[in-house]
Image (cartoon, rainbow, N blue to C red):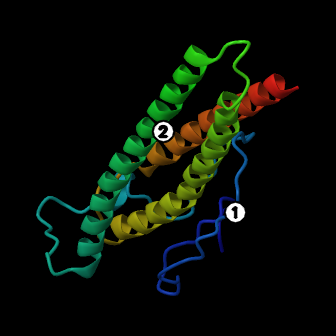
Amino acid sequence: MSDERGHQPYDDERPVAEDHLRAWRPLLRKGPPPVPVVPSSFSRDGWATAGEEVSDSNLLWRQYVLFSDLYRYYIDLIWKAAIWFYTAIGAALAYFFAHFNAGNHTYLPLLLPFLAALGAGMAQIFTRVMGYVAQMEDWLEYIAVSLRLPGRPHFEFIRWFCKFVSATLLAISAACAALFIYLVT
């Protein structure tokens, strides 16, 4: 039994790794938010008491620490990739507009389709990352509920940041393609 988002309840028959291709959800959804069917690590009802300890040899705890470290690494990697790409696109467009004039229609406009293709490819990469991050979020939620930990890293930030970067990269790609078509025709 799963809820409307496709999340499975946590039990012993749940597979360790689910299919990595998740169903696409529309960005805007009408109606109230879905009611969670499974326990949440953000609900105080299931939290461990202050006297309980988790052993370092506990496999779930080691996985939780590993996933938490991966979360920090992914934030760093995604942030650096986005900043690098915005800088490269900005520098290329600044060079284009600084050196482009009415008589210079030889090789310089060919920079625009290259930037458009590069931006669309990076947007595709950021879109693919969102599915994997959602799967890691499910795993961390399962571990946090199983170990009765209060909360988990906020993977929502990475997903929303990837959506924002994908949308802006697609907009930049469309603008570069439109400008190239305008200049060529």
Q: Give the number of the disc on residue 44.
A: none
Residue 33: image location, x then y, percent: 63, 45
Nearer the viewer's eye, disc 2 or disc 1? 2
In the rendered view of the protein, which quadrant contains the N terminus?
Answer: bottom right
Q: Quadrant of residue 6?
A: bottom right
Residue under the point 42% across and 47% down: 78
Nearer to us in this view, 180 or 65: 180
Q: Which mark is residue 23?
A: 1
Q: Residue at x 64, y 17 (%)?
A: 100
Classify mark 2: helix, strand or loop: helix
Circle 2: is it few (<14), some (14-19), or many (20+) Cα within 10 Å?
some
Q: Quadrant of residue 20?
A: bottom right
Work out which quarter of the rendered image holds the C terminus and state it: top right
* 75 horizontally vs 2: left or right: left
For label 2, the residue is 85
Q: In the rendering, at what x and y percent does residue 93 appear?
A: 57, 25
Can you say whether 144 is above or below 11 in the image? above
User: Disc 1 on helix, strand or loop?
Assistant: loop
Identify the mark nearer the N-term, 2 or 1: 1
Q: What residue occupies the far top of the structure in this picture?
A: 102
Q: Which amino acid type corresponds to the residue marked 1 in the rendered image?
A: Ala
Amino acid type of the residue that numbered disc 2 sits on in the rendered structure:
Phe
Disc 1 residue crowd, few under 14, some 14–19, many 20+, Cα 10 Å: few
Does the rendering let one see residue 152? no
Looking at the picture, tell me which residue is in the foreground, 13 or 87. Answer: 87
Between 162 and 52, the one lying in front of the other is 162
